[in-house]
Amino acid sequence: MESPLTTRAQDQGALLETILTSVGDGIIVFTRDGRLQHANEPAAQALGAASVAELLETPLRDIMERFDVMDETGEPFPIEALPGRLALTGEDEPPSVTLRFRIRATGDERWSVASARPLRNGSGQVEAAISIFRDITHLKRAEEAQRFLAEATEILNRSLHLDEMLTSFAQLAVPTLADWCIVHGRGADGAIEPLVVAHADGEKVRWAEELGNRWPPNSDDETGIGAVLRSGASQLYPGITDEMLLAAARDDEHLQILRSLEMKAVMTVPIPGQDGAFGTMTFVAAESGRRYDEQDLELAQELAQRAGFAVENARLYAKSEERAHAALVLSHVDDGVFLVDRDGIVRLWNPAAETITGIAPRNIIGRPVHEAIPSWAAVEPLIPIGETPGAGENPVQAVPLELEAGEIWVSLSRVGFEEGTVYAFRDLTAERRVDEMKADFLATASHELRTPVAAVYGAAMTLMRTDYVLGEEARTRLLEIIASESDRLTRIVDDVLWASRVDSGRLTLAIDGFDAAQLAAGIIAAARAHLPAGVTIAFEAPKSLPPVAGDPDKVRQVLANLLDNAVKYSPDGGEVEVRLEAQPGRMRFSIRDQGLGVPLAEQARIFEKFYRLDPQLTRGVGGTGLGLYICRELVRRMGGRIWVASGEGPGSTFFFELPLAT
């Protein structure tokens, strides 16, 4: 019969065994010679044994050879520094350490907090050590995942450029989550395109890119990237077998290369987009030897989810940037551009459109186009619509637009697209005015030439007649007609030639100092010789004037032209006054008449080519419309300026200034 003491000891042993079995921490007891005396079930599982009995039969040295022991940073941890080894040396409270254990056979990693205490005999000698290790793998991986995703979020906030962002995401995964990270996208034609390849070794990246170009994934593959893109469902391969490689290889060379990669595990997850999967991220464990599980897949999916957000942000940014660039371009082009949606509402009106029409954006954007442009209903059907944008491809129509400020002529083209119609137009008002003035010039020049030619021809034919004898007075009168009309023809031809020289840039100037009063006096004397009845010329100038810098011949032509105009536009007679005044640094010439005057609305245009105040010759004033244009160009090229002033009363005053000689 057992004694009560023996029974109590057995009961305590059973209780201790129950406690050791029920706790979650792994517990082992080992002697100084490396023999395991005790272990619980969590310890057997953590150390890769099938049972506690199997673990106890295995020498501790053999057990430790199953693992690579590392510290938290991944550096090798010395075995002699383990808490259990320190406890065997007699250290009563060895410090606890956090360790990473990589199972060499599978590549799986576990995290543990290890602690130990020495077990002493009755004499105080250390006979064994009890080692306790708490598995914190789940906690560490969660912490690692949080740090990993925090970095991913930082990337998301840091970059809005798609290529840069995807590259950063892939590089983040290496080597934290994978040895390789490859991002694929869906091309416009549906083909799968490699976007990013990341690996710690740059040479391997270049090699992998070449590999992907030679054997790209197919969109109709039953597994892998093509299947994930179609289905949007992730795929996890915790272990890669040779049978899998045989099934994936395209040919023998491809199989050989796949085998050389020594892939241990693969995950492929979709990158979500608005219209299904934008692409995929593939994570490959190779040389590290790690294996993937569901927790790794969840982390990969979360990373891809954030990459999907980043892709959408990048796309939105790219669109907004594209629109900003388009708006910037539209704000600087000279052509007016506006967009009318399918309901006829103006949605865009660029600055050039405002400049050309005088219509501010606030007065037209958001309104039907015909409300802001009353003549639009009549004009719009005249504009042919183009199919695609492109220089020279779409027809252009010149049309008038009736605006509040008056009529303008524009060349209009349009291109339709899904959201409406884009119109582009250019102001042709000035060109049309020039065309009209050219037409007036041709009509005027024809008239101007026909009159003197007819006079010369008639006088010459009369002089040639032999059927009667002309008196001396009649003969002299006919010769005077030929001479004066020939001079008139010469001046017309000269105007045309001078305008041609000015336009072609063949005009040459010989700038020199000259006496303005002497030059003006000579021109006035010549003009007085053939003044019409009722017109007089007065000349006023100080006795002493500084010399003027200019080309005397060109100044003579300008002054003669202005004086001739003053006389010509004084059909009812009156005094023409020529005045010279020295201004600071300049000499001012003024020619005042008491003739027809220049209406205020016309004063800005009279120096334009072909422009004439009396194009219909209602007052009998002829001319080519080139004289004032030539004057303006000559004065401007000599560094001066020319203008006109005309008040309420009759007459006008033309001014021009030239710099003084230094």
Image (cartoon, grey):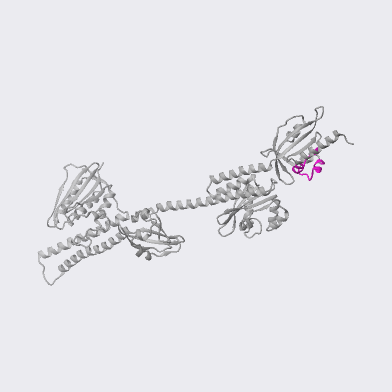
Q: Position of residue 222 (x, y in %)?
A: 66, 59
State the extent of the magenta-drawn residues as a range.
Answer: 36-57
Q: Nearer the viewer, residue 459 or 269?
A: 269
Residue 42 visible to an observer of this rendering:
yes
Residue nearest the observer in this picture, 13 or 224: 13
Residue at the image position 26 percent from the left and 52 percent from the top? 632
Quarter residue 80 falls in = top right
Q: Is residue 101 above or below residue 424?
A: above
- Give the quarter of the figure containing the N terminus: top right
- Which image quarter is the C terminus in? top left
Picture coordinates of residue 346, whole percent (x, y):
40, 58
Q: Residue at x 70, y 49 (%)?
A: 264
Image check: 295 left or right of 438? right
Would residue 532 be counted in the magenta stretch? no
Where in the figure is residue 484, as x and y percent of width and height? 17, 60
Q: Is residue 278 left or right of residue 533?
A: right
Q: Nearer the viewer, residue 163 or 205?
A: 163
Work out whether residue 184 can be spotted.
Answer: no
Measuring from the top left, give residue 511's x and y in whole percent: 27, 47
Q: Is residue 38 magenta?
A: yes
